[in-house]
Amino acid sequence: DSGVTQTPKHLITATGQRVTLRCSPRSGDLSVYWYQQSLDQGLQFLIQYYNGEERAKGNILERFSAQQFPDLHSELNLSSLELGDSALYFCASSVGTTQREQYFGPGTRLTVT
Amino acid sequence: GENVEQHPSTLSVQEGDSAVIKCTYSDSASNYFPWYKQELGKGPQLIIDIRSNVGEKKDQRIAVTLNKTAKHFSLHITETQPEDSAVYFCAASPLLSGGYNKLIFGAGTRLAVHP
């Protein structure tokens, strides 16, 4: 158990809908990262937050957004969902910027029908 | 652009044999190289990592080597056991100013250890 928690574990929704995925980092970690894992694209970095501020963006679609709250938990919002958004979404956390180790949560499996 | 190539995509070994997985990275600014193990239905688990100022690191049956000049790094698992069966991912990460710390992952290697 990495100490990173994600909810929900599974999510099934229809095209065009909007969902919110939630992540709680390990105790003491200030950085949160979101990754998407699909069969054809592998593990792709989406976005990083550090202590409430966005730090880096990767291959994140404009339909997707994220935020990190004062209690350091983070939410990833996916809107106007398409079939191709079906994937595993992982959250990872790290202590900060000088400690590089990222610890992953168990993931949320999103299925868009 | 940033890219990490990983080989082989699948690897089958007998219990007790060694397994080697190799990765090549393109971004010369990369200075941190972790390896993750992902079991079915679980998130990636950090098993070992190496920084660019070190050439080799060992942790029991697992070792990682880094060749900065060639931009290669490898994972070595000795005395493999059935519980080592999983998908292994290498990753590379540049550390840029401002705490930019993303991981670029390889495509993964599915390791099967047969009793």
Image (spheres, coloured by chain):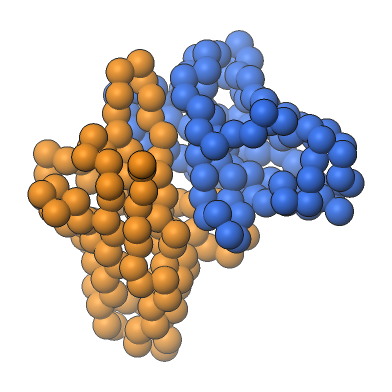
- Residue A72 drawn at (x, y percent): 58, 19
Left or right: where does residue B2 sit relative to residue A11? left
Up-down relation of residue B77 to residue A27 (above or below)? below
Q: Residue at x 36, y 72 (%)?
A: B8
Which residue corresponds to the image point at 38% horizontal and 30% vertical from the top-left? B101
| Rendering quarter of residue A39 | bottom right
Residue at position x 52%, y 63% in the image:
B39
Visual hue assigned to chain A: blue
Q: Residue A99, relative to residue B115: is it above or below?
A: above
Q: Say which quadrant the N terminus of chain B sits in.
A: top left
Residue B59, given in percent of the width and then of the height, sits at 23, 56
The color chain B is rendered in? orange
Q: Is residue B29 visible?
A: yes
Which of B67 and A107 lies nearest the eye of the viewer?
B67
Residue A74 appears left or right of A20: left
Q: Is residue B17 above or below residue B41?
A: below
Q: Quadrant of the C terminus of chain B?
A: bottom left
Q: Where residue B106 sits: x, y (%)? A: 40, 55
Give the number of marks. 0
Question: Which residue is depicted at the point 30% across and 34% down?
Answer: B94
Q: Which residue lies furthest to the front in this view?
A: B1
- Tell me, yes or no, if residue B49 can be seen here: no
> Can you give x and y, in whole percent of width and height, for residue A13 in the image?
86, 46
